[in-house]
Image: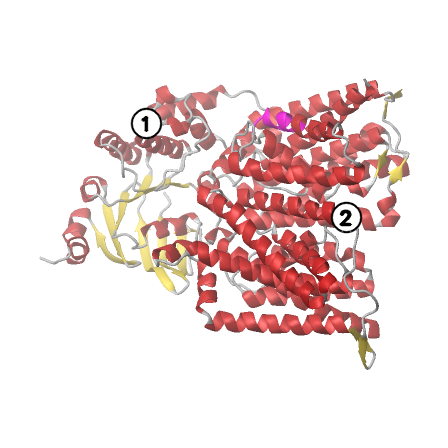
């Protein structure tokens, strides 16, 4: 039962990640390969705030969102001057830079040694300790995030994003600035990924840079590509599929050293087959440009 | 101070290798517009091809490295890129498929050979010293080979009809079909050339610092950065950018340490693109104009 | 009312001058035609006005303000709108949404507004009004890619009109549509100028249309303005006849 709850918590955290990436990839049509970097910035920011400065949970969460959002904003200022390949390369670069910082700036992040002993959240004296309590907690946060994103999706802002995704030139001829709208989307998407990072840190109570690599960014993109981006159902389908996939592989009984490589090979295969036969995913609104 | 000079010279030598990678990536990117991430797999394959072949001597190693790289390069073009192009897939879709190829090949190699670093050469490399500068034999070879290859490509672009066509493809792909030139045959030749170039860089580096299955991506991303920073239309821009990146990395190594190399490369990219989005050495003005 | 002016505008593509030394005034509340053979530079001029291309030479003014070098979205917000030759409606959005998008103001499109606005019935009503103007009111629920070619052109027109632009740049607005819809569009253009005080610039190949609705015509050839004047005069001119008919008589 605990195992099932664990899976559900991870699915919940991933849903937050994937829906925030959906804002960038699905609604703006931008292939961002640095979402794990925001995930990581969120996790480390939260951890350092809580452990070094003993800031209470809610305030730490709020600050994490703001700080991660600022990073997202800063990277999108140069990045969004491009589309297509140069944009992907810039996000890739940002991902590698952030990972490098998390891994090498040992005095700040303890690098590959990681940070253990992260306390579980405590809200107004109520400590969220057991796995069942944490599951309910993640569920609440997920609902808040989804409602927030849902309002955005259905707003004039969301419609403008969709029009820019459909045909950027036509939308711009109507007065919509792709640069400014995408800037907002990217910043908000990154900030929400920071929430997921904070949740992850306080759940696992240990973080190290290997959870926030390029492979992780690619994994999140694969989820969206599989399930379909740009609407509300696709990301959930993709997340459930991709989280359950490695778990089911576990039952094949592969030795650990081999399992990671095999899993990657399967992801690679999924990518190629998906792009060839069904680029819009299981239930997506559009295909990658 | 001496350390700085030594590092700068090392940077010059690595710059040569980076140039080869940039040429390899850039020729494919400019002519076919494909963001050839799978090139990282070709890079790794060349290194492991050499590793296997060296069991029968160094020349066997070199040949097997080149051959394996070219074979993979062609396989990717024939069985992945061409089907996608014929299907009319967008470039973003092909980029992702290319990434998929990279992931599969690299992890297959890891399954076959293990995830750890392996060395090709055993023993210590003989080194030569000029005043206080020390260079190993392999470094000298790296530099000489790189320069020779660059010169061959450069003169080839001026004289060879093939390379002129390759360059023109990037501007007007439809025009070539109209002129009756066999596009797919030309593309195959491009991928052969690309495979040879990246294999050269890979093997030169492998002999020096060893091989591991996961070094491919950051190697070719460096090439991609050099191409974009240099300006997609400017072959010399790629080469200059490659040397620039290498020198700045050396400078950083002098002040900090090698572990920041990757971060520096991309910092440079973002910095350069911020001020000159079309590349440092081009003169076009608006991205939309392309 | 502001006048759209081009002064000695030139645009060069790798040594080839697509547009050369073009000076033109698009008078307010008039319909001006741009004619000329294919490749003469007409669409390029539209690109230069809207900011998709930057002129290499010359100036472009809207009123007193120079608009050279502005981004397309900035030019649009000044009140210059355009309809594309290849229509470019938002295929995955509904017919209604295509028009609503045009009605949304920049302030309404920020994320903040999403949380503080009330569900806007007025927008839907206004969008339906424009759809009715072009005769597409009954299709408002459909996905726009389900419309016929002619209907899509009408939708693009409705979207453009909803944007409340003062200047409308139309690139072959009736090409490829049946005569019934074509007449509808032409009547609409007249109404726009007379009733709604718009300024229209229209690229057209159909000489009957040019004579029928334009007030002034510019004839472009090989990137230059070769003739300018009233439609009857322009179409009678030797240069124009030479290009279209291959001889002078």
Q: Position of residue B263 (x, y in %)?
A: 73, 54
What secondary structure do most residues of the magenta stretch adopt? helix
Q: Is residue C246 magenta?
A: no
**Label 1 CA crowd tier, 10 Å (few <14, some 14–19, many 20+):** many
Q: Which mark is residue C50?
A: none
Q: Which mark is residue C134?
A: 1
Q: Is residue A70 above or below residue C25?
A: above
Q: Quadrant of residue A55?
A: top right
Q: Which mark is residue B114?
A: 2
At 48% from the left and 66% from the top, the residue drawn is: B163
Q: Secondary structure at mark 2?
A: loop
Q: Secondary structure at mark 1?
A: helix
Q: Are marks 2 and 1 on the same chain?
A: no
Q: Is residue A234 magenta?
A: yes
Q: Is residue B271 above or below residue A139?
A: below
Q: Quadrant of residue C181?
A: top left
- Nearest the viewer among A174 and A182 is A182
Quadrant containing the C terminus of chain C is bottom left
Magenta span of residues: A231-239
- Nearest the viewer among B148 and B196 is B196
At 42% from the left and 24% from the top, the residue drawn is: C126
Quadrant containing the N terminus of chain C is top left
Classify residue A83 as left or right of residue B186: right
Residues at discs 2 and 1 in contact (Cβ within 8 Å): no
Asked whether residue A216 is in view, the answer is no
Q: Quadrant of residue A112?
A: top right
Q: Is residue A159 above or below residue C237?
A: above
Q: Position of residue C60 (x, y in %)?
A: 40, 54
């Amino acid at each position: 039962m605990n195992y099932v709850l664990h899976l559900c918590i991870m699915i919940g955290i991933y849903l937050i990640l994937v829906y925030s990436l959906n804002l960038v990839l699905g609604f703006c049509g931008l292939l961002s390969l640095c979402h794990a970097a925001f995930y990581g910035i969120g996790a480390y920011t939260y951890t350092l705030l809580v452990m070094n400065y003993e800031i209470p949970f809610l305030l730490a969460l709020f600050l994490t969102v703001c700080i991660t959002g600022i990073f997202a904003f800063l990277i999108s200022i140069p990045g969004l001057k491009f589309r297509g390949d140069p944009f992907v390369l810039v996000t890739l670069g940002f991902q590698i830079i952030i990972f490098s910082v998390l891994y090498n700036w040992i005095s700040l992040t303890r690098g590959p040694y990681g940070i253990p002993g992260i306390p579980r959240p405590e809200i107004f004296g109520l400590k969220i300790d057991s796995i069942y309590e944490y599951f309910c907690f993640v569920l609440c946060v997920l609902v808040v995030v989804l409602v927030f994103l849902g309002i955005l999706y259905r707003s004039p802002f969301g419609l403008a994003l969709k029009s820019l995704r459909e045909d950027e030139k036509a939308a711009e001829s109507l007065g919509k600035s792709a640069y400014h709208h995408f800037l907002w989307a990217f910043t908000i998407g990154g900030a929400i990924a920071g929430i997921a990072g904070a949740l992850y840190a306080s759940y696992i109570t240990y973080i190290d840079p290997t959870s926030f690599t390029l492979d992780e960014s690619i994994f999140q993109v694969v989820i969206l590509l599989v399930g379909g981006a740009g609407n509300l159902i696709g990301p959930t389908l993709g997340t459930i599929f991709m989280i359950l996939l490695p778990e089911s592989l576990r039952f094949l009984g592969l030795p650990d050293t081999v399992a990671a490589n095999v899993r990657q090979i399967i992801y690679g295969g999924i990518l190629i087959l998906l792009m060839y036969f069904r680029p819009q995913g299981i239930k997506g609104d559009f295909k990658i440009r | 101070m001496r350390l700085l000079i030594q590092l700068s010279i090392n940077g010059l030598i690595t710059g040569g290798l980076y140039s080869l990678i940039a040429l390899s990536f850039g020729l494919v990117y400019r002519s076919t517009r494909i963001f050839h991430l799978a090139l990282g797999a070709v890079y790794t394959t060349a290194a492991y091809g050499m590793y296997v072949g060296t069991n029968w001597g160094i020349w066997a190693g070199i040949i097997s490295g080149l051959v394996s790289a070219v074979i993979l390069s062609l396989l990717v073009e024939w069985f992945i890129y061409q089907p996608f192009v014929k299907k009319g897939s967008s470039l973003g879709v092909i980029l992702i498929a290319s990434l998929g190829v990279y992931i599969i090949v690299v992890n297959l190699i890891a399954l076959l050979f293990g995830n750890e670093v392996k060395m090709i050469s055993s023993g210590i490399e003989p080194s030569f010293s000029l005043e206080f500068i020390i260079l190993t034999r392999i470094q000298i070879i790296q530099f000489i080979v790189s320069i020779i290859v660059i010169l061959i490509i450069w003169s080839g672009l001026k004289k060879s009809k093939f390379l002129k066509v390759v360059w023109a493809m990037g501007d007007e792909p439809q025009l070539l079909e109209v002129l009756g030139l066999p596009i797919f045959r030309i593309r195959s030749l491009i991928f052969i050339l690309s495979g040879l170039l990246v294999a050269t860089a890979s093997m030169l580096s492998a002999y020096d610092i060893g091989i591991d299955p996961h070094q491919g991506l950051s190697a070719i991303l460096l090439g991609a950065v050099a191409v974009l920073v240099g300006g997609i239309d400017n072959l010399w821009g790629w080469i200059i950018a490659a040397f620039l990146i290498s020198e700045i990395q050396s400078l950083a190594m002098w002040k900090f340490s090698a572990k920041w190399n990757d971060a520096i490369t991309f910092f440079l990219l973002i910095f350069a693109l911020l001020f000159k989005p079309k590349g440092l050495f081009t003169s076009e003005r608006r991205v939309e104009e392309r | 009312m502001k006048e759209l002016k081009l002064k000695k505008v030139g645009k060069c593509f790798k040594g080839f001058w697509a547009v050369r030394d073009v000076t033109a005034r698009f008078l307010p509340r008039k319909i001006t035609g741009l004619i000329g053979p294919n490749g003469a530079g007409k669409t390029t001029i539209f690109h230069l006005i809207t900011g998709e291309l930057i002129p290499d030479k010359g100036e472009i003014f809207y009123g007193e303000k120079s608009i050279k070098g502005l981004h397309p979205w900035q030019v649009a917000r000044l009140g210059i709108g355009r309809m594309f030759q290849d229509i470019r409606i938002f295929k995955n959005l509904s017919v209604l949404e295509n028009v609503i998008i045009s009605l949304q103001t920049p302030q309404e499109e920020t994320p903040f507004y999403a949380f503080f606005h009330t569900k806007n019935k007025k927008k839907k009503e206004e969008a339906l009004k424009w759809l009715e103007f072009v005769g597409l009111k009954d299709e408002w629920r459909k996905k726009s890619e389900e419309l016929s070619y002619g209907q899509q052109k009408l939708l693009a027109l409705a979207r453009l009109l909803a944007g409340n632009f003062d200047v409308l740049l139309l690139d072959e607005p009736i090409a490829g549509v049946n005569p019934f819809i074509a007449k509808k569009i032409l009547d609409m253009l007249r109404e726009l100028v007379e009733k709604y005080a718009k300024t229209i610039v229209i690229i057209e190949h159909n000489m009957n249309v040019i004579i029928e609705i334009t007030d002034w015509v510019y004839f472009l050839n090989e990137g230059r303005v070769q003739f300018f004047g009233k439609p009857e005069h322009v179409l009678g001119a030797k240069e124009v006849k030479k290009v279209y008919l291959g001889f002078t008589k």
